Amino acid sequence: MKKLKVAIYSGIIPSTTFIENLIHAVAAQGHEVFVTGVKKSEVNYTNHNIKVASIPSGKIALILNVLWQKLLLQTRDRDLFKKLKNIISSRVVNRGHPWLLWAKYLPVVLNQPEIFHVQWAKGVEEWMFLKDLVGTRIILSLRGTHITNSPLSDEMVASSYRRCFPVIDGFHAVSKEISAEAGQYGAKLEKIKVIYSAVDTEGIRKFVKNGRSKSNETLQLISVGRMHWIKGYHYALDAVRQLIDNGIRVHYTLIGWGNQEEVLFQVNDLNLNNHVTIVKKIPHKEVLNRMSNSDLLLLPSVEEGIANVVLEAMAIGLPVVSSNCGGMREVIHHGVNGFLFENRNTNDLVIKIEQWLKESETKKNSIVHQAKTDIQVNHSVEKLGTEMSTFYYSVFSKN
């Protein structure tokens, strides 16, 4: 089969765990993967199929880089250069300084990918020009709040989706639940493919748990994610208070980034200062290390696609108690590979945590083992690469 030239765009390098796994998975299938964006930290892609074009952070470096790429495009295709110049001229007011737009668009136009895979729905309209300019097929990932919440709270976002979704070439949904959301903005169901997120099991092998805390020790709970109301941390904190009132020794570690004011207020209001530790954003390996030393992962979210942190917890043997929101029902099977509690129901969350504590060691081992097996079967990087490659081919051949 023809190897495709695929651009995976998220805006920053390196990106989220899901996107980095996607980059490696697609490159492993033999496709040329083009990654562009602002480099936030060093990243070393060992696969020669991965090509990186980072946008310089310094003003002088950016200008020199743009001038060189302008010259390249003019030399290769003067007509294409003029068309891109017109596009940028029309966007300066709304999108920013022309030098920044040149720096953003030139690497992609010079590379001319056959597939341009956008990871965040709110940014897809900016790249739709690639369809007419160089014939690129646009694929959009449907993930989290960009599709479930943003268009409901912002009519400008909803309008953008209604303009773009009917003409986008393909949609990748991280869950069956979230795929249904796109239809109300004009996405054709036959263009949507559900492909579950993956876990780099080799990369996290050294964090696999080798046991659990003894019953007479403090129960170590942990959650990971940005500080946002949709993550439901207020339900988790209320549950911690109830567990303590029920005579259970508990410590809750919340690794979160963003505005902590609301959470800090609730911790103080519930008199949980000695029972809760809030950690700002830390390196991924440190997150995994803290997870490995915990007893239960809590996912109290009000809405989710499929949370990567849950998949990683299952892979390392950390039991999961999750709300039954969004796509989590497609991953967690209650009492089989984890526990589900009723969304927004603190009392039910407490019941499910206490249920885990009361389970026999045989049952606990069975749940942990099944969770690891499900990750290996349904959420491997290899499976992600194969399914995404097949999806790219289907989009490319239909158009």
Image: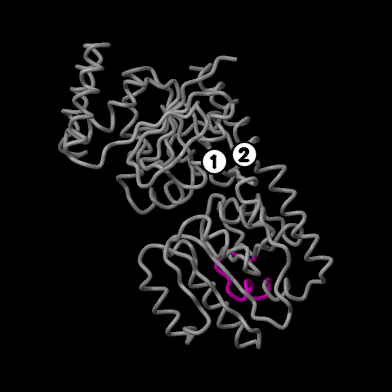
| Front position in the image: 2 or 142 | 2
Quarter of the figure with the N terminus: top right
x, y percentage for residue 125?
A: 33, 34
Q: In this view, does 337 lie to the left or right of 283?
A: right
x, y percentage for residue 295?
A: 66, 69
Q: Which residue lies furthest to the right in this view?
A: 362
Answer above or below: position of 278 versus 366: below
**Number of on-image labels:** 2
Helix, strand or loop at label 2? It is: helix
x, y percentage for residue 28?
A: 58, 29
Helix, strand or loop at label 1? It is: helix
Asked if the stretch drawn in magenta spans residue 345, the answer is yes
Answer above or below: position of 123 versus 78: below
Report crowding for label 1: few under 14, some 14 to 19, many 20 or more residues within 10 A (C-alpha). Answer: many
In terms of image quadrants, where is residue 320? bottom right
**Which residue is painted at 55% across and 68% down in the image?**
344
**Which residue is painted at 46% across and 30% down in the image?**
139
The residue segment tinted magenta is: 341-352
> What scheme was used to colour the molecule?
one colour
What's under tag 1, amino acid-wise? Asn
In terms of image quadrants, where is residue 350? bottom right
- Check whether the beta carbons of the residues at disc 1 and disc 2 lie within 8 A of each other: yes
Q: Is residue 46 left or right of residue 163?
A: right
The residue where tag 1 is placed is 21
The residue where tag 2 is placed is 381
Q: In this view, does 187 lie to the left or right of 356?
A: left
**Which residue is painted at 38% across and 73% down in the image?**
262
